[in-house]
Image: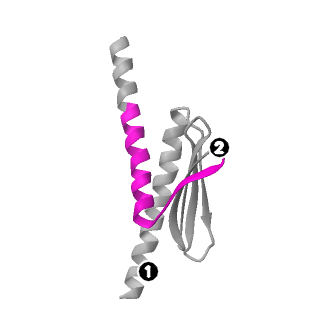
Amino acid sequence: MFLRLSEQYRTVVQDLVMSLQALAKSLQKLGVTATCYVCDDGRDGSGASFVAELGDQHMVRFLVSDFGISWVESRNGRELVKFEGAEAIQELQRIADNLQESRTQRSSSISMQR
């Protein structure tokens, strides 16, 4: 049972890494400073560090690895909130939803200008 759970967690980590890479690229296309650094230790372990500057010295950092998942939001270099596990993933979803909303609004305004 534990080997199965371990493999499922590794799959979740891999899915999150791919999603973070895609999110960073999407944010960059919108002009948001965002990076995603991928780590791979060569022993089936992998992870990523995602950082995005949301303006007005407001930053988010999402870390995922075989050791855990965390979300840290800060402003002016001071930590505002930190989430771990499922809560961290929910915050990542919130950013992705905001991105989708921005894209929809942007497409609508371009269509209206034509």
Q: How far apart are marks 2 and 1 (CA)?
A: 38 Å
- Where is residue 45, by image quadrant? bottom right
Q: Under tag 2, what secondary structure?
A: loop
Q: What residue sits right under mark 1 in the picture?
A: 6
Residue lying furthest right = 77
Q: Which amino acid does the dot numbered 1 rest on?
A: Ser
How busy is the neighbourhood of tag 2: few (under 14 within 10 Å), some, or many (20 plus)? few
Q: Which amino acid does the dot numbered 2 rest on?
A: Asn
For image coordinates 37% across by 43% down, the residue present is 97
Q: In which quarter of the image is the N terminus?
A: bottom left
Question: 42 or 12, which is in the foreground?
Answer: 12
Q: What residue sits right under mark 2 in the picture?
A: 76
Magenta stretch bounds: 77-103
Q: Quadrant of the C terminus?
A: top left
Looking at the image, residue 44 lies above or below residue 22: below
| Whole-percent x, y for residue 5 in the image | 39, 80
Q: Under tag 1, what secondary structure?
A: helix
Question: 86 or 77, which is in the foreground?
Answer: 77
Whether residue 67 appears in magenta in the rendering, the answer is: no
For image coordinates 52% across by 62% down, the residue present is 70
| Whole-percent x, y for residue 67 in the image | 54, 74
Looking at the image, residue 114 lies above or below residue 38: above
Residue lying furthest bottom = 1
- Where is residue 107, by image quadrant? top left
Residue lying furthest top = 114
Marks 2 & 1, CB-CB < 8 Å contact? no
Question: 28 or 44, which is in the foreground?
Answer: 28
Whether residue 97 appears in magenta in the rendering, the answer is: yes
| Whole-percent x, y for residue 64 in the image | 53, 64
For image coordinates 38% across by 83% down, the residue present is 4
